[in-house]
Image: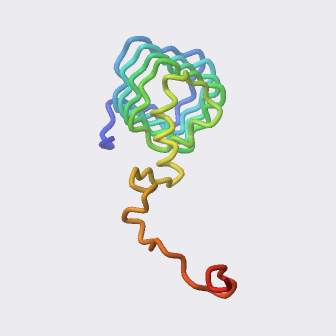
Amino acid sequence: MSGDYVAVLAGARLRDVAFRSCSLDDVSLRLASGTRVDILDCSARGLDLYGAELPGARLLRCDLTGAEVSGARLTGARLGGSTLDGLSGAAGLRDVVISSAQVPVLATALMAALGVTVDDGAEDGADDGADDEPDDEPGDRRRDR
């Protein structure tokens, strides 16, 4: 996200609002709040939902690539059919509803949000700085045999 927004609805209070089949690319809904908000079949790449409070919102079949959801409160929101690649702040998706097809992409974003590094060389100890032999310490069973 570049910081240059196409539309700024930051802090907006939305009620009974529907965005359908439109472009919301790089739109800011930062700190917005609302009830009965639908975003359906939209391109919403880079959508900024930082701190937004939109419980029960429906963001269905949208391209949410690169969206910012840090600190969002989207309890019960439905994201079915939406592209979730490259989300920032994925922990902000607590208590949302997704489809099973979205799990792998969201799992990757959640791991990043939690600081978990996925390293396919980890199972063989490659580049982890650990030596293969445990250190001799008091009570080491190898030494006490």
**Quarter of the picture holding the N terminus:** top left
The residue at the point 56 percent across, 24 percent down is: 98
Residue drawn at point x = 48 percent, y = 32 percent? 104
Is 26 or 105 nearer to us in this picture?
Answer: 105
Q: Report the front residue among 112 and 129.
A: 129
Marks counted in the figure total: 0
Q: Residue at x 50, y 14 (%)?
A: 18
Say which quarter of the image contains residue 42: top left
Picture quadrant where residue 71 is located: top right
User: Height in image: 73 above or below 55?
Assistant: below
Image location (x, y in percent) of residue 64 = 41, 28
**Residue 49 image point, x, y percent:** 49, 36
- The answer to whether residue 91 is above or below residue 74 is below
Position above or below: 100 against 111: above
User: Closest to the observer: 115 or 55?
Assistant: 115
**Snapshot quadrant of residue 57:** top right
* On-image quarter of the C terminus: bottom right
Farthest-out residue, bottom = 138
Viewer-side residue, 67 vs 116 = 116
> In the rendering, at what x and y percent does residue 102 appear?
49, 26
In this view, which residue lies farthest toward the front? Answer: 145
Q: Residue 9: x, y in percent?
A: 45, 31
Relative horizontal placement of residue 74, taking residue 101 as reference (left or right) = right
Figure coloring: rainbow
Residue at horizontal 62 percent and vertical 37 percent from the top: 94
